[in-house]
Structure formats: C-alpha cells, structure tokens
Image (tube, rainbow, N blue to C red):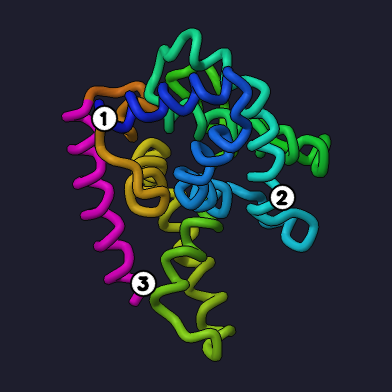
Amino acid sequence: MASESSDIQVLLGKAQAGDKAALAEIFDRYRERLRRMVRLRLDRRLQGRLDPSDVLQEAYLDFAKRAPEYAANPAMDFFLWLRLLTGQRLLVLHRQHLGTQMRDAGLEVSLYQGALPQATTHSLAAQLLGHLTSPTQAAQRAELQIRLQEALNRMDPVDREIIALRHFEELSNNEAAAVLGIKKSAASNRYIRALKELREIMQVEE
C-alpha cells in the first residue's frame, strides 16, 4: 500500500508538470474498481440513458481538475478519494436526469462529508440473482427478486451497505471501515454477521 501511494504521488507530480498521460494512467489503474461501484449504484431508471462508461468519462474530467488539490493535501486514501469523486459525479447525474424524483433518503453517508447514491435492495437482489438463476427463468427470477428485496429491506442499512462494499465493490475491510466511519473490527464483525444473515435469507427463499 505504501509503495502504491508513493507511485501515485510520483504520477501526480508528473501530471502537475504537464504530463497528461500520467493522469490517464492513474485513472486507468482504478477504472474497473470504479466501474463496479457505478454499476451497483446507477439508478435503474436511467438504464438506456446512462451507462457506467458515461459516468466514468465525466468522473475522469473531475479528477483531472481536482488532482492538484489531492496532491497538495492527500488527507485520505487515494482510491477512496477517487471513489468519492466518482460517486459525487454519479449523484450529480442522477439529479440532472431524475430531478425531483431523487430521494435524499437514498444516500450513503460518508465519513468524508460526501454522499453517494445508495446500493438499493433492487440492485443488490439483481446482483445476487444474476449468479443464481438462468435468464430463461424470467418469471421465477422476478418473483424471487421481489421476495429477496423484501428480505433485504428488513436488514440493518449498515449491514446491507457493508455487503455492497465488501462483496460487490470488493473493497478491503479497512476501506469499508473508512467509508462507513466505523472501526476496522466493527466493519469485520458486521460483514460476517451480514453474510450469515444473507445466507439464511437465501436458504429460506430457495
């Protein structure tokens, strides 16, 4: 991690010196991780109007503008900063396209005084069922997804979020703890508990 951080600082220094390729190299390192986050949190009402590549393209422009800001004051882990920046751009796009349909209740509260679109129970259920059912079983899949969403709605919101962060975004325990603003041990315990609860839910639904 220290080596990666040092490498990022070197590339940021090159970017400040006018090397635009350095910025692209930095962003490309994290593109797939950011794509997972965007795919999970992109509002399903925008399917066909926006896709993760559109969001990442705009997020890159934000990153290019604000990279000197991070280089001058790297107050947090670089990837978490870049994830937050991308999430904020996704939130702006949600508001632009959905307007008053946006619900402030559907925001992830971040330790870093930012807000990202929430991983909805619809999105979580769809991701889970994507590995469990065949596309030919559309009717069964739709029925099971509704039941699974209802079950996920009964879970503690932080437990749902820890599943989204660890299982789908594939964040480390340390990263998830930082995002949620909780201790590392608490994040680990919540993840274990949430997985156990989710397994129980899936066994009942199956």
Asked whether the residues under the numbered discs 2 and 3 touch, taking CB atoms below 8 Å apart as contact, a structural biologist would say no
- Residue at 63% over, 32% down: 20
Q: Position of residue 161 (x, y in %)?
A: 41, 41
Q: Which mark is residue 62?
A: none
Residue at the far top: name it.
72
Q: Position of residue 157 (x, y in %)?
A: 42, 39
* Element at label 3: helix
State the quadrant of the N terminus. top left
Q: Answer with mark 2 or mark 3, whichever residue precedes in sequence.
A: 2
Q: Amino acid at mark 1?
A: Ser
Q: Answer with mark 1 or mark 2, whichever residue precedes in sequence.
A: 1
Compare residues 183 and 65 and report the one nearer the observer: 65
Dot 3: few (<14), some (14–19), or many (≥20) neighbours within 10 Å? few
Distance between the Cα atoms at labels 2 and 3?
36 Å
Q: Which residue is mark 1?
A: 3
Quarter-of-image position of residue 96: top right
Q: Position of residue 186 (x, y in %)?
A: 21, 29
Q: Amino acid at mark 3?
A: Glu
Distance between the Cα atoms at labels 1 and 2?
31 Å
Mark 2 or 3, closer to the camera: 2
Magenta residues span 184-206
* Element at label 1: helix
- Residue at 77% over, 35% down: 95
Compare residues 139 and 164 and report the one nearer the observer: 164
Quarter-of-image position of residue 133: bottom left
Asked if 170 appears above or below 132 in the picture, the reply is above
Asked whether the residues under the numbered discs 3 and 1 touch, taking CB atoms below 8 Å apart as contact, a structural biologist would say no
Asked if 26 appears above or below 166 in the picture, the reply is above
Q: Which residue is mark 2?
A: 54
Q: Which residue is mark 3?
A: 205
